[in-house]
Amino acid sequence: MVDDTLLESGNQKIEWARNHMPVLSIIRDGFASEKPLKGCRIAMALHVEAKTAVLVETLASGGAEIAITGCNPLSTQDDVAAALDTRDNVSCYAKYNASRSEYYESINKVLDINPDITVDDGGDLIFTLHKTRQELLSGIKGGTEETTTGVYRLDSMSKDNALKMPVIAVNNAFTKYLFDNRYGTGQSTWDAINRTTNLLVAGKDVVVAGYGWCGRGCSMRAKGLGANVIVTEVNPVRALEARMDGYRVMTMDEAAKIGEIFITTTGNVSVLTRDHFKLMKDGVILANSGHFNVEMNLEELESMSKTVRTVRENIKEYHLGDRRIYLLADGRLVNLAAGDGHPAEVMDMSFSNQALCIRHLVDNDLDIDVHAVPPEIDTYIAELKLKALGIEIDELTTEQEKYMREWEHGT
Ligand SMILES: NC(=O)c1ccc[n+]([C@@H]2O[C@H](COP(=O)([O-])OP(=O)(O)OC[C@H]3O[C@@H](n4cnc5c(N)ncnc54)[C@H](O)[C@@H]3O)[C@@H](O)[C@H]2O)c1
Ligand SMILES: O=c1[nH]cnc2c1ncn2[C@@H]1O[C@H](CO)[C@@H](O)[C@H]1O
Ligand SMILES: N[C@@H](CCS)C(=O)O
């Protein structure tokens, strides 16, 4: 028996998100009348919260049958999961704080739908499919991948000839990463850090590891909050860009001694290790907004600690004897595990890409490979978003088009 209060809270959150996702709402209306996904079975592993629920509703309104679970043990909002499970043709297996075995059990339940299409965030569904559920591969039309690291992994699989299905790299659409990874992560990471710690940012030394799209967003918003921002990088071009954007750039060995708040956004492992923890000041705060819980070496942090205790919701204190280090949300994506994820207006574009790419997979037979989002989908979403914002832009005149095509003109 599902708790009514839980359902009411989940439905309220979904309604709020739905009302702030105008592009997805247009796509949903089209899906409801055309039913382009009729008879299609979709297996999904995404962060199960309100904006994701709106995507699921959109796919269901297009005629699909959906099984969904989480893509992170700590990002599921149980009220939304309960509400989603009441929708027609939707089964939701996600739960907050799932153990590793529960997490993979749910991934397998989702795969039991015998999917035509898979939707991933970070690749756990597709990797399980390739490792232990290969019998399902022959029925698969294709999949989509939501995030940067998931796409890197798929590219590696493709290079090794290990990939056995077509996948669209949704992350790589302009209308995804330029907004979601940058402005979404920038805002939601700080929202989560601020609501979790209730501490001041102004005047603090904030270290952002990685100056990709997420790192740019987190640095930009840290600066806006009055922090002194330090960036660490391994890519010389991005390091230079960070420097010219006005930040200090140095190695993590140097930054570890100075920083008061550390945010990892690299998609890489062991960016913060024992050597860095040894150098850190008393009371530093660590948050990850990159990938899984691997960016900080938590085993090393634990092994160095005399005591580990929860001192406030989503804050663990690691007492090293002489100093304390505070870890937010167990080192999982802080914006989702200790916050509500990206703003709805941003996920509007990311999930419109998902919906239209899923339709594209159903309508076409793509080769086994990692595919770009078709440019016409990307442009269409940008146009709809501008329209929803009430913004008109200029068009090229015939003279301008001609000028841009020709090459003979000089001074
Ligand atoms: N929290 C969220 O909601 C959210 C949103 C989007 C993406 N992501 C995830 O965040 C991560 C970053 O995504 P992105 O789009 O910014 O990727 P990106 O590839 O644009 O940027 C990652 C940057 O990290 C740098 N880097 C790699 N190893 C490093 C190291 N050891 N030290 C310092 N820098 C290092 C790279 O050179 C690169 O510039 C990915 O794992 C992605 O999947 C999270
Ligand atoms: O609120 C949200 N709901 C669903 N997905 C989200 C939200 N915020 C960020 N991401 C997605 O999570 C991926 C990293 O795991 C990002 O690529 C982003 O698109
Ligand atoms: N779904 C994964 C991918 C993040 S890049 C996670 O939540 O950590």
Image (cartoon, grey):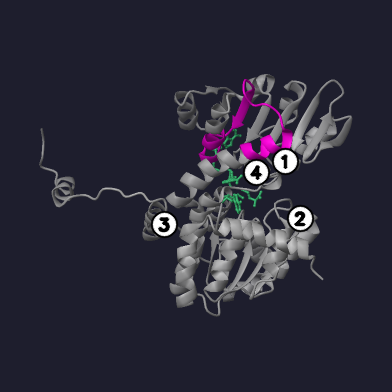
Give the number of the mark in front: 1 or 2.
Answer: 2
Above or below, 16 against 282 in this view is: below
Please state the horizontal and vertical placement of residue 148, each as a whole percent of the image: 55, 48
Please state the horizontal and vertical placement of residue 387, each as a whole percent of the image: 38, 54
Residue at the location (58% across, 56% down)?
A: 17
Say which residue label 1 marks: 331
Above or below, 113 against 218 in this view is: below
Disc 1 crowd rating (10 Å Cα; few below 14, some 14-19, many 20+) is many
* Mark 4 close to ligand 1, CB under 8 Å: yes
Which segment is the magenta one? 190-218
On the rendering, which quadrant does ligand 1 occupy?
top right
Question: Which label number is shown at residue 1?
Answer: none
Above or below, 251 against 337 in this view is: above
Say which residue label 3 marks: 381
Question: Which label number is shown at residue 335?
Answer: 4
* Mark 2 close to ligand 3, CB under 8 Å: no
What's the residue type where badge 4 is placed?
Answer: Asn
Is mark 4 in CB contact (under 8 Å) with mark 3? no
**Displayed quadrant of residue 81:** bottom right
What's the residue type where badge 2 is placed?
Answer: Tyr
C-alpha span from label 4 to label 1: 11 Å
Secondary structure of residue under mark 2: loop
What's the residue type where badge 3 is placed?
Answer: Ile
Q: Earlier in the sequence, mark 4 or mark 3?
A: 4
Secondary structure of residue under mark 3: helix
